[in-house]
Amino acid sequence: MRVIILHPSEPNAQTRAALEDPRFDQRVQYVRGSPLRNRDLGSAAVYDAKAVFVISTGRTNNPMLSDATCLLTVRIIKTTSPWVPVYCELNVPQSTSHTWADWDHLVCAQDLKYALLAKSAVVPGFSTFIANLLTSSSTSQHVNLARLDPSDRKWLREYTRGASQELYCLPFAPAFSKQFFSVASHIAYVLWGVLIIGVETQRTRRRTSIDQILNAGNEPIETRAKNLAVHQARLIGLVRTS
């Protein structure tokens, strides 16, 4: 998969270093241009993209202006290429009321931050848990517990085991299509060490609608459902937790 970054300014030193990294130099391309110009959108191949991510400037003295630029960009893309899914990130909650932009998926950075902080007050460590799920890590492979103080080994062992988990969305096997969610979760955990936390289903009407249900309980799993699974990041396949 190739990634194209469209930005009106030249890349800074940090971005240039990332673009020259051997892991990304053949997969990431930087295009200087404005997302508000159709010609520049064409240069970035937006019309053939599998998805477009419109990200508001985080560090700015005028977050409303940055959000306004994002909203106009989303609207232009959805007007010229309605078939392309658009993921939009905005800074302030006030900007989320402008549904005329017609985004497919929306994240408000401020809302998300406050929601994580509020949840962390009820469930200590929740924000760290979410952050670790959203990143890939091989921390547990590089920590030598034997060299640590015995009082630190237990919590660090638990933390590194949790930090090495990853979140994936995978299609269900046909054998699970008529199973209850609780039964499928038990089987996956016992046999493969996979923790199923939810179900994602897709419905096509005027546009594709994606529904995600966490901890679906005793609801049956549809044939086209996908499961959100957590498994060890160290291996490609499914891993036992024991």
Image (spheres, rainbow, N blue to C red):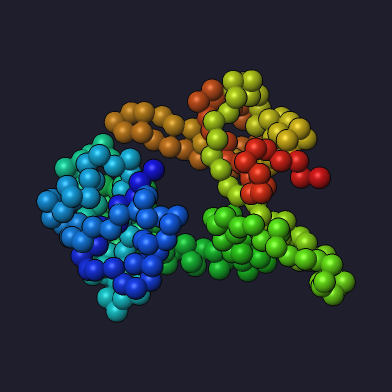
Specify the quadrant that holds the N terminus. Answer: top left
Specify the quadrant that holds the C terminus. Answer: top right
Q: Position of residue 32 (x, y in %)?
A: 21, 61
Q: Is residue 110 visible?
A: yes
- The answer to whether 140 is drawn above or below residue 182 in the figure is below
Which of the pair 32/23 is nearer the observer? 23
Which of the pair 122/241 is nearer the observer? 241
Q: Position of residue 161 (x, y in %)?
A: 72, 56
Outermost residue on the right side: it is 150
- The answer to whether 156 is drawn above or below residue 62 in the figure is above
142 sits to left or right of 69: right
Outermost residue on the bottom side: it is 61
User: Quarter-wise, where is residue 50 in the image?
Assistant: top left
Q: At x 42% / y 67%, what residue is drawn?
A: 110
Q: Position of residue 219 (x, y in %)?
A: 62, 30
39 sits to left or right of 207: left
Q: Is residue 215 visible?
A: no
User: Quarter-wise, where is residue 205 in the image?
Assistant: top left
- The answer to whether 223 is drawn above or below residue 120 in the figure is above
Q: At x 58% / y 47%, what residue is drawn?
A: 167
Count of marks placed on residues = 0
186 sits to left or right of 50: right
193 sits to left or right of 35: right
Which of the pair 184/211 is nearer the observer? 184
Outermost residue on the front side: it is 22
Q: Position of residue 218 (x, y in %)?
A: 66, 31
Q: At x 64% / y 57%, what residue is drawn?
A: 138
